[in-house]
Image (spheres, rainbow, N blue to C red):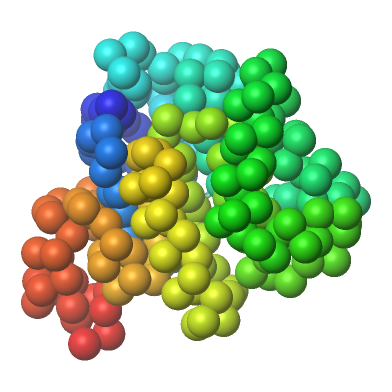
Amino acid sequence: MLEVRNINTFYGNIQALHNVSLKVNEGEIVTLIGANGAGKTTTLMSICGVVPPRSGEIIFNSEPIHRLPPHKIVAKGIVQVPEGRMIFPELTVMENLDMGAYLRKDKEGIKKDLEYIFELFPRLAERKNQLGGTLSGGEQQMLAISRALMARPKLLLLDEPSLGLAPLIIKQIFEIIVKINREHKTTILLVEQNAHQALRIADRAYVMESGRITMEDKAENLLNNEKVKKAYLGL
Ligand code: ATP
């Protein structure tokens, strides 16, 4: 579904990504793990066109997308939930969700997706008229994921969904990610510093260090890999 081929991405003169290649097959959860500053966010930003690569290719459903502006990439079905959630604090939960569906015209489909989201996150249904900014951190993450789902993504890019949340909420968020993948048939590329949880739910994984992919394997193999255990799992 998605193939990133040898991309090199820069911030001004600073090269953040070096020949990064990765693949996400339809139906998979793929995770990208690595330390702070390894280049995980930049990889997502390159895929969604916010920080386009200077060289290399990004192919989505057999079509090159690395020269497209971000809104065209969203229209192709790649939707990102950015780090730090970035919901609209001055808009209500409902208005935030409507923003997610702004490219869509299928009223019936939108209604169905809203029902699905409120089933997935009953807390959001209870708070649908509340301002986004008044929600707890976990609820804001739920809202950010829901807003992305309202765009009916084929590929959902999640940047550190567990960041700054309490352990119990983190557990819920990871369970929801699996549900979205299985029930909502959404392919997922998940960036996480919480390597343990991410590897437990992912099919395959990539490890990033200093802007390069240094390992790739089935997630369960990486969970048992001595190097990964030491460097990322604290074991
Ligand atoms: P984090 O978990 O902190 O987001 P990361 O693995 O996602 O880490 P990136 O945010 O992609 O890492 O950063 C990769 C490198 O690019 C780092 O060296 C970082 O300092 C640099 N970088 C990131 N954003 C910018 C920017 N806007 N301008 C200049 N350099 C940046």
For the residue pair 34 and 157, the one nearer the viewer reads as 157
| 233 is higher (above) or lower (below) than 182 | below
**Quarter of the N terminus within the rendering:** top left
Q: For the image shown, how many numbered marks are present on the structure?
A: 0
Q: Quadrant of residue 188?
A: top left
Side (left or right) of 71 relative to 132: left
- Residue placed at 31% from the left, 18% from the top? 61
- As drawn, the residue found furthest toward the bottom would be 235
For the residue pair 12 and 148, the one nearer the viewer reads as 148
Side (left or right) of 158 relative to 18: right
Residue 213 point in image, percent of width and height: 23, 49
- Residue placed at 73% from the left, 50% from the top? 87
Residue 51 point in image, percent of width and height: 52, 32
Whether residue 11 is visible: no
For the residue pair 206 and 133, the one nearer the viewer reads as 133
Q: Quadrant of residue 114?
A: top right
**Quarter of the C terminus within the rendering:** bottom left
| 196 is higher (above) or lower (below) than 190 | below
| 136 is higher (above) or lower (below) than 29 | below
Whether residue 112 is visible: yes
Q: Quadrant of residue 193?
A: bottom left
Residue 183 point in image, percent of width and height: 39, 46
- Residue placed at 82% from the left, 41% from the top? 95
- Residue placed at 41% from the left, 24% from the top? 54
Side (left or right) of 3 relative to 66: left
Residue 174 point in image, percent of width and height: 43, 65
